[in-house]
Image (tube, grey):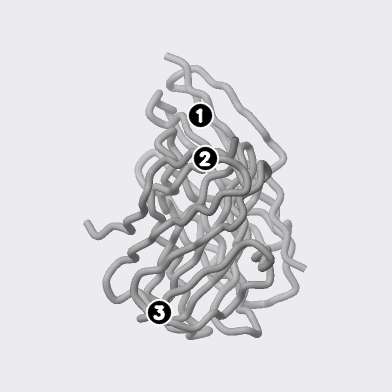
Amino acid sequence: EAEVAQSPRYKITEKSQAVAFWCDPISGHATLYWYRQILGQGPELLVQFQDESVVDDSQLPKDRFSAERLKGVDSTLKIQPAELGDSAMYLCASSPESGDYYNHYGYTFGSGTRLTVV
Amino acid sequence: AQKVTQAQTEISVVEKEDVTLDCVYETRDTTYYLFWYKQPPSGELVFLIRRNSFDEQNEISGRYSWNFQKSTSSFNFTITASQVVDSAVYFCALSEFSNTGGFKTIFGAGTRLFVKA
């Protein structure tokens, strides 16, 4: 079964350092999402891509977070500088839909990257 | 505005008991989708079911069943004869079409289910 690949699986970093996460969606999936999940809460959307274009980054703290999906395939999420409050699970998800109003299939999630900032 | 409420933070049952996880949502759209996902300790969210707003038929899949009622804006999930492997956090989610393109999905806070042997 096709999977969404994420790496690293775990990351410990010191505050003020830079950290990056990588995601490779299911082949052919046009839409890619980055979610942040704080312990004990539901996932919250950080950024949504349609192919290589950002569709929604309204919840992305742009002073320290950046995301790119240069060729419309894999994606990188970066935090610089990391803060203690950034400790969370970062989940990547992909979906085959192409923005059609009448079709929404839900997402396939990766296993996530658990970030601990010390 | 979109909102998903899962009022039950934690539920603990003994194996073979039936358990219902509640989900109440708010939306202004007439077209929307509802989902349930399971998050085992490994962390990955696993898709369980999708339901669109025009399909109020209840669904059964093995020991799982879902009750969608638009009149009460609820989409509840029942596990029959629970098993230890059902222990996980379960999330209800609501998707609406966004004016920026594509669907925007919000998740509830989740319900942690403990099934004891």
Q: Nearer the viewer, mark 2 or mark 3?
A: 3
Q: Earlier in the sequence, mark 2 or mark 1?
A: 1
- Classify B33 as above or below B37: below
Question: Label 3 belongs to which residue?
Answer: A70
- Residue B110 falls in image quadrant: top right
Density class for disc 3 (Cα within 10 Å; few <14, some 14-19, many ≥20) is few
**Type of the residue with mark 3:** Leu
Question: Label 1 belongs to which residue?
Answer: B18
Residue at horizontal 61 percent and vertical 76 percent from the top: A56
- Classify A15 as above or below A24: above
Q: Nearer the viewer, mark 3 or mark 1?
A: 3
Tell me the quadrant of the picture where the N terminus of chain A can be found.
Answer: bottom left
- Residue A4 rendering spot, x and y as whole percentages: 33, 59
Residue sticking out furthest to the top:
B117
Q: Are marks 3 and 1 on the same chain?
A: no
Q: Chain of mark 1?
A: B
**Type of the residue with mark 2:** Thr
- Residue A107 rendering spot, x and y as whole percentages: 43, 63
In three-dimensional space, the C-alpha distance between marks 3 and 1, rounded to whole angstroms, equals: 48 Å
Residue at horizontal 67 percent and vertical 34 percent from the top: B9
Position of A27 with respect to A36 (left or right) is left
- Classify A30 as above or below B52: below
Q: Are marks 2 and 1 in contact (CB under 8 Å)?
A: yes
Question: Label 2 belongs to which residue?
Answer: B78
- Residue B86 rendering spot, x and y as whole percentages: 42, 32
**Type of the residue with mark 1:** Asp
